[in-house]
Amino acid sequence: MTDQNPPRQGMIGRRTLLKALGVTGVAAATGAAARTGTAAAAPTLHDVIIIGAGFAGITAARTLREQGISSVVLEARGRIGGRIWTSTLAGQQVELGGQWIAESQALAMAELNRYGIPLVGDPDAFPTISYYPTTGGPQTFDFLSANEHFGTLLNKLFEGSTSYFPRPEDPLYARDLVARVDQLSLRSRIDQLGLSTQDRMWLEGYTNAYAGGDSSTRGLTSMAQWWALGGHTHAGWDAQTATRPQGGMTALLTRILRDAAPDLRLNSPVTTISDTGTQVNVTLRSGSTLSARTVIVAVPANIWRTLRFTAGLPAVHSAATNYGLGVPNVTKFWFRTSGSSGRVFASGKPGDPISLLLPQRVLSTGDVLSVGFSENASLDVTSRSAVQSALQRIAPGVTLLEHAYAPWGRDPYSLGAWGMRGPNQLLAQLPAIQQPHGRLAFATGDIATGWHGAYIDGAIESGIRAARQALAQL
Ligand SMILES: Cc1cc2nc3c(=O)[nH]c(=O)nc-3n(C[C@H](O)[C@H](O)[C@H](O)COP(=O)(O)OP(=O)(O)OC[C@H]3O[C@@H](n4cnc5c(N)ncnc54)[C@H](O)[C@@H]3O)c2cc1C
């Protein structure tokens, strides 16, 4: 254990653990020498440094703690959570990043069960009025019939997914069939469907929202895998945005953090990661350097390109970060709108400044709280009047009273929103992007196998994997 985090009683000792893991040779010997050496004034050599306190990093810290290994977590922001951010609007708890968890997400569900946190729904999320785009502008539609029609469009988009993703938790299982769809962007897949102008508007407006604005930049395989993981059905798809953890995402993460009990250092942005071959030196923007036997890089994939890796990055990591696995331009909003407008659902067409409006809750005043998304980099998200006009482009008559927003694409510590593969990236990246590089392991939902990118389930998966990889280095 490091001097800063003495072991708790009852934890497995390091030597016992190494024996249990069958780790011998240089790494183990190096560790013993560092502990018993005579250089009393030598800087602390930590077992593991984790860079990033999102779901991936904190899950990794807890996995290490469960094996008796303490960690130092260096987090750039003044808060934990990264791309989850539980905030408030109109006195209500709102999620400006990740929000929903579905029962099909086994790892996230295991966390909720472990901590006794129930999933809750939002009965006010059923709209009283819904707008969809037409060639003549947004029109009202009966929500249930329109949603059913939308389901037929999604079924067309993902037709064949039961063949190419028969085991969706293992996206490479049917590799030969996957090879045929991996090259397709969402837009090129839509091109194959021969849709009417209006159907195309509906579907591409929606896929653009997922893709951060442009369906040609993101592969079919990400969305299709999420569809498959939800059971290859429209109902399974809709369930992914229907329930949330009681108390919010940060409450869940805080419970994991409590068990992880790392030496958490907020406001500690890392700039340089230097793997010497026997240890890793991590330099902060402040200029101070910490050292560890192994480091878990638990920042978003888009952030790798902003860090200096003195030993370089593998080609697959460089390609992914330079492409930007995290989709660009996304701003997530919460709106308080006048109750007289109703509980409004609205879906935009390609190019609209706001792509989706989803009612969530009715306040005691009658005002409505809704979630919204924009992928338009030129929208002034800070301006109520600009946002009000943007909203009215998809939902005429909606009166905006107040809004909160998180422009993830401009956030220096995410440089994008959820992760989503580009065309040809599934076969090119998995599993190489999950492998350690020297004494570095990589953790982020962006590179998960199952619920990758847009789900904390994948962040948890990657945190557990990276912690195991780090343990093998000790
Ligand atoms: C708008 C939006 C909506 C979403 N909706 C959902 C949803 O409904 N359900 C769901 O399950 N998931 C959702 N997701 C996805 C989910 O939030 C992410 O997959 C998950 O939070 C990623 O966790 P992570 O640990 O991989 O990365 P992050 O949460 O981004 O954590 C990485 C951490 O690294 C830190 N960091 C970055 N650079 C540095 C540095 N130089 N030095 C030190 N620290 C650094 C960051 O500050 C951050 O805390 C959504 C994401 C977004 C953006």
Image (cartoon, grey):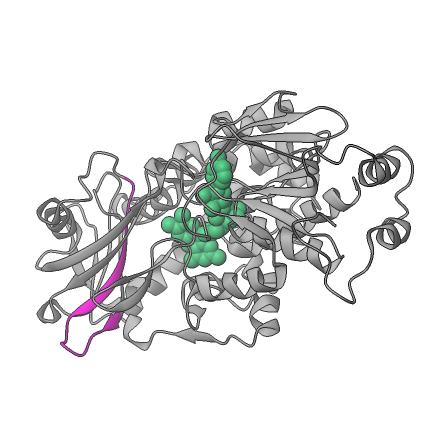
Residue at 35% x, 35% y: name it.
Answer: 214
Position of residue 307 in the picture relative to residue 343 (left or right): right
Q: Nearer the viewer, residue 278 or 34?
A: 34
Question: Would you say residue 156 sits in the magenta stretch?
Answer: no
Name the residue located 11 percent from the left edge and 60 percent from the top edge.
401
Give the vertical position of 107 relative to 206 (above or below): below
In which image quadrant can residue 41 be found?
A: top right
Q: Does residue 411 appear anywhere in the picture? A: yes
Q: Is residue 453 visible?
A: no
The answer to whether 239 is drawn above or below residue 178 in the figure is: below
Give the magenta range. 361-375
* 156 or 298: nearer the viewer: 298
How far from the left and from the top, in percent, is residue 20? 89, 54
- From the top left corner, tell me how far across and down residue 384 is, in percent: 12, 49
Q: Nearer the viewer, residue 339 or 187?
A: 339
Point out residue 337 in the picture as x, y percentages from the top left corner.
15, 63
Residue 73 in the figure: left or right of residue 353: right
**Residue 472 found in image quarter:** top right
